[in-house]
Amino acid sequence: MLEKYMEIKEEVKNALNEKKPVVALESTIIAHGMPYPKNVETALEVERIIRDRGAIPATIAILDGKIKVGLSKEEIEYLGSAENVSKVSRRDLPFIVAKGLNGATTVASTMIVAKMAGIKVFVTGGIGGVHRGAEESFDISADLQELAKTSVAVVCAGAKSILDIGLTLEYLETFGVPVVGFKTDEFPAFFTRKSGFGVDYNVDSEEELAKAIKTKWALGLDGGIVVANPIPEEYEMDIDIINKAIAEALSEAEEKGIKGKKVTPFLLENVKEKTGGNSLESNIRLVYNNALVGANLAIELEK
């Protein structure tokens, strides 16, 4: 039945059949997260890093209504430069597919498709979360609900500091999602290594992490795992500079009445401008770092 809607790239299909390590990648970062051509260069480099470690990358997107698990270089190039590519979360998937449109998958929808295809590990930049002021707006990312029910390990650099990180972690705790620090006791805040909040567990290796993940799912405890992998120290941003830029961007978003799924792209673009483009470089470097850990984790899980 799924074959009607989903197309798995031959290389990815073979790897899955042969129980070889595969790493899922999202496409929102290509279509909405970075400017062209930086977005395409980054996506291709992430795939190369994963291959060099000995795993197979599977970038996920929707093209002409077909869910694609694994993209060609040309398809990545197209996604990075095309206009009118929809941002697709769980609620959007059936409509974008049924209408035969193009869509870039968020953390939530990438997790869904990865699970459908049988991929256990997914690498992204940062997860969505509870937005600041959510006690009034109820603005909470669908990523968190997906983590609560979809059994995929998500390697990320924590949550973007534009969010309310304390409430995001409270939400994940309520739904039983383990938040694991990779070689850290503190939850990273995307551009910075520290957020002031702790993690549930600290692991020192991908092997230790793989054992815990395998045990969770073997016990029938469905749902994802947040693997919080801090940005490398040399690419970390100054916490005061980033917090000042975020505060100003949030204030501008409120003045302009920007809400819903438009908030995050607006804030990230605004922060990039206020930091002279430094935040974009940090963003790229943390994704590369996550790709490395994700590939190693996928390899350990297949062992």
Image (cartoon, rainbow, N blue to C red):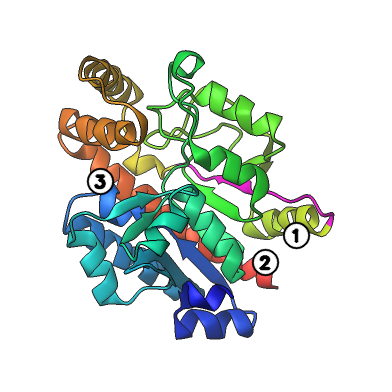
**Dot 2 corresponds to which residue?**
301
Contact, mark 1 vs mark 2 (Cβ under 8 Å): yes
Q: CA distance from mark 2 to mark 3?
A: 30 Å
**Dot 1 corresponds to which residue?**
214
Of callouts 2 and 3, the N-terminal one? 3
Crowdedness near tag 3: few (<14), some (14–19) or many (≥20) residues, C-alpha within 10 Å:
some
- Residue 100, x across and y down, in percent: 34, 66
User: Which residue is at 36% across, 73% downward?
Assistant: 71
Instruction: Give the magenta part as a residue range.
Output: 219-230
- Residue 226, x across and y down, in percent: 59, 44
Crowdedness near tag 2: few (<14), some (14–19) or many (≥20) residues, C-alpha within 10 Å:
many
Of callouts 3 and 1, the N-terminal one? 1
Q: CA distance from mark 3 to mark 1?
A: 34 Å
**Dot 3 corresponds to which residue?**
281
Mark carried by residue 244: none
Quadrant where the N terminus is found in the figure? bottom right
- Residue 219, x across and y down, in percent: 84, 54
Main secondary structure found in the magenta portion: loop
Q: Secondary structure at mark 3?
A: helix
